[in-house]
Image (tube, rainbow, N blue to C red):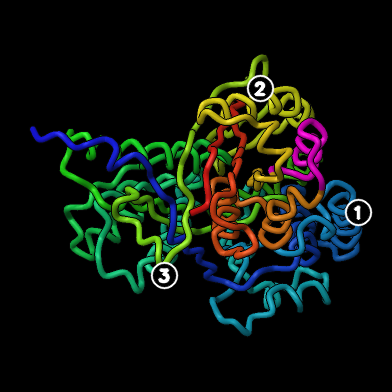
Amino acid sequence: MSTIDKKNYSSIILSDFFPVKPSPPIPQDVSCDLLAMAITKAKCVRENIVDQKEIDAKLKKARIKVAQYGVSSKYIKQRYMVLAASDYSDTLKIGQKIAENGRFIETALKSKLFRDIIINHRNPQGLDLEERMALYDKYAGKCIRLMYKDVNLPPDDVIHVTCSGYISPSPVEQYFSEKQWLNSTITHSYHMGCYGSLPGIRMAHGFLSSSMAGITPLKKRVDIVHTEILSTHSKIVEDSAEQIITMTLFGDGFIKYSAYPEEYFDKTKKNGLKILAIKEHLIKDSLDGMTWKLGSNNFNMTLALSVPYSIRDIVKPYACEIFSDADLDFEYEKKKGNIVYAIHPGGPLIVKKICEKLELSEDDVAISNKILYENGNMSSATIPYILDEITRDNRITSGKKVLSMAFGPGLTIAGMLLEKV
């Protein structure tokens, strides 16, 4: 077996971020009204209510509750929810007629969210898990085709990351088989929630490093594909504060990007992010803080009020450790103004508590807040969206360090230290 000089393959670069938005965004105020009507519809089905006055009274209560506990348009302007879009037309004005009317007239409720999950059944729980996964398979497949529409050369490897769909063969396997890209190795990295991009990137780094060491044939490109359809798991039958927060926070997200050995990265034509360190571990005494479990009808999420505080208490030593892993000093680089922050905006309070502990300003987390505002929380796809923004922003110059962090069940804190190139 031949050996390769490690010096020539010392770095892995992330680049070619390509987000896909297959349907128009839904304004947050409209999506919240859709949710209030969906909750009301489920209650009316469950309680066999058909009188319009009773329906209107329940709808009024649902709207008050969603307004009280839902994430407001102050923090999220819009979200992408492919199941709530009736088609992929740019002229679609989703929800306008519904919001104006406010009644359950089936001819007005034409969105897939209502037709597929609410209207065409008499079960307030909505579709069962098998039916929801069929919808996931359909729309994830559409998005993967858009990602690779203008790609002629297959990657050596592709890693499929998601926490919202389980289908085997996966949508990636289906597409690569259809394209006859049979020599690409497909690996699945599932169910890790909002920090899911970090294990996917760690795997890509490992695959490339292994090939550089001669363990596998030499690889020049590993693609990472995210297909998150959180709207598949709307749990309209339950209107607890926790569920309303969840259903008004998450949006669908789709993005593809690539990892290259520095040897094969074209510095003259692209911006990229060099991986300096990756770190992931559990947070003490926080096992029940966040869960993401399979239910009979959808995936069920719980999120304890203690989560922002558990993250707050660990984030400073974590930041210092990951910089130390790269032989750098966090406080020194911060003082120089040499750090860009790519923090997963799991919710407004999480970002706020991190800012307090790390002594960051609103400007320091502006990109994270922008991605949340324009898309909602897209789970594993959120960090790649933030990294895409950083690579495109010419005000962020080469050499700047990028501290990326995300969180998920466990509680797990995961992150990377990157350098813009």
Residue shown at 56% from the left, 43% from the top: 298
Q: Quadrant of the N terminus?
A: top left
Residue farthest toward the top in the current orientation of the protein: 285
Q: CA distance from mark 2 to mark 3?
A: 38 Å
User: With 55 as the anchor, is 351 left or right in this view?
Assistant: left
Q: Alpha-carbon neighbours of circle 2 within 10 Å: few (<14), some, or many (≥20)?
A: some
Q: Quadrant of residue 370?
A: bottom right
Q: What percent of the width, then of the height, locates residue 201?
A: 43, 42
Q: Magenta residues, as a range? A: 346-361
* Residue 403 visible in the picture: yes
Q: Is residue 167 magenta?
A: no
Disc number lying in front (1 or 3): 3
Q: CA distance from mark 2 to mark 1?
A: 29 Å
Q: What percent of the width, then of the height, locates residue 365?
A: 73, 49
Q: What percent of the width, then of the height, locates residue 367?
A: 69, 55
Earlier-in-chain disc, 2 versus 1: 1
* Residue 240 visible in the picture: no
Residue bearing mark 3: 146
State the residue in front, 13 or 299.
Answer: 13
Residue bearing mark 1: 64
- Name the amino acid type tagged 3: Leu
- Residue 406 vertical position relative to residue 120 in the rendered view, above or below: above
Residue bearing mark 2: 288
Q: Alpha-carbon neighbours of circle 3 within 10 Å: few (<14), some, or many (≥20)?
A: some
Disc number lying in front (2 or 3): 3
Residue shown at 35% from the left, 56% from the top: 265
For the stretch drawn in magenta, the main secondary structure is: helix
- Name the amino acid type tagged 1: Ile
Number of callouts: 3
